[in-house]
Amino acid sequence: MQICELPTWLTKDYMQSQLRAFHQDPQLNVLKLWSNAATGKGENYVGIVTRIHVELEAATGGAALQRTYLLKEGCPKDAPQAGLFAEYDVYAREMDMYEHILPRMTQLLREVGIGDKLHADAVCIDREQGIMLLEDLTLLEYRNANRVQQLDLVHTHITLQMLAKYHAAALVLKQRHPELLSRRFQTSFFTRGPKGYATLFTCLFRGLIRYVQTQPKLKPRYHAKLTRLLDNLMEYGARAFDVNEDDFQTLTHGDCWTTNIMFQYDGKGQPTTVVPIDFQFSTRTSPILDLHYFFSTSLQVDVLARETELVQYYFYELKRILGQFHYEGKLPSLLEFQLQFERRRFLCVVIALVFQPLMIYAGDESPDFCKLYQDTAEAISFQDSVYESDRAQSIVAHLLPIFDAKGLLDEQ
């Protein structure tokens, strides 16, 4: 990773003050600071993540220690996509998650004997500077699975266990402290009103249409349908997120895919625990949206083929954890939950056919965010390159007949 220049305000004194408070060590001394980029190509579009290296001396004395922390900032105000993210309030939302929501969800889980780590600890939330300083989960030997290879069944089960804990804790939090979730958690990728992601999804979906037009086996059956679908893409997506007071709903992660979850592994290389990261799009809606998004972006083909069983697995985990809370609120039956899962399936059309090829992209073109929503020659070239790999083409060829048979490509 490349060396990064520290912001002028991020001094040794600043870090020392924050680390003394976090570690409850008023004698802790910061001796040296340096940094490098913490994410690679195709891993983060929403902001800037910098790994801060700190050489420090604890009050107990002894040799100097080296620690790392993650600095999360929004994209620069002069960046082309800055206005897009401002529409969705992603930075303030994630600050609220780390400062107010996630610690309380963790506390609720611990009250019923669930001690699993639910998030990286926040060293500080500095709203004046617009940054979050978080613990570096790699120090605890967490790491991402391969986003291109995607997840096997063991990784998938562990992630579904985590989502069940997350959703259950959020559901109980809403019951006990409804004021905490009353603002900033209503906006998703498909929310009516904001235009940023409408532009992005429209551009990427046009890339899909251009690809289908070049395929003799796909064009006759799907090109016209996909072209007509484009006009209603965002409205149909919004309907998938719509909930009313009678619907089973909670706080979702909102962007749960391979790069936004980190695993610990045992000596045999098998995953043992998982922690979610990146909470910019946490939204109050049906937990089914997290399942569709996760399934549509992150699962190997043979695992996705077991989708109905995976929904059942998640549902029983959720029901079990809510039982530990002695939850007496609304909970659908498994049959009702499976039917709701099917009713919200349109999300998969967009995420599986557009986001998934982008998420597994391993080509040579630079995946700058602006190329996702602009219609310049350079941007269109990148959008088209997403469908050049055998994997992406296999995904499209496999899923289009399924979505068509379910009526998802027709007017709704």
Image: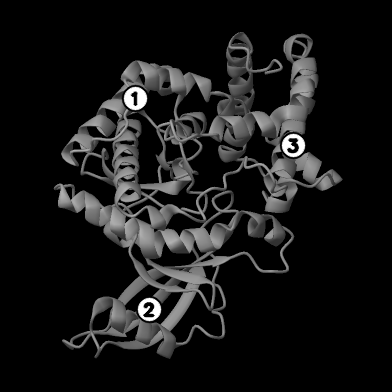
Q: Which mark is residue 54?
A: 2
Q: Secondary structure at mark 1?
A: loop
Q: Earlier in the sequence, mark 1 or mark 3?
A: 3
Q: Is residue 99 left or right of residue 29?
A: right
Residue found at x 35% / y 41%:
167
Depth check, mark 1 against mark 3: the one in front is 1
Q: Which residue is mark 3?
A: 202
- Is residue 405 shown to the viewer in this render? yes
Q: Which mark is residue 171?
A: none
Measured Cα–Cα span from mark 2 to mark 3: 43 Å
Q: Which residue, given by chain and number where applicable, does mark 1 sit on?
A: 332
Mark 1 touches mark 3? (CB < 8 Å): no
What's under tag 3, amino acid-wise?
A: Thr
Q: Counting residues from the N terminus, which is met first, the one under dot 2 or under dot 3? A: 2
Give the residue type that dot 2 points to: Val
Q: Which one is nearer the viewer's eye here, 2 or 109?
A: 109
> Decide: marks 2, 3 in contact (CB < 8 A)?
no
The spot of residue 166 in percent (x, y) is 33, 44
The quarter of the picture where residue 20 lies is bottom left
Q: Looking at this view, is 280 or 402 the one in front?
A: 280
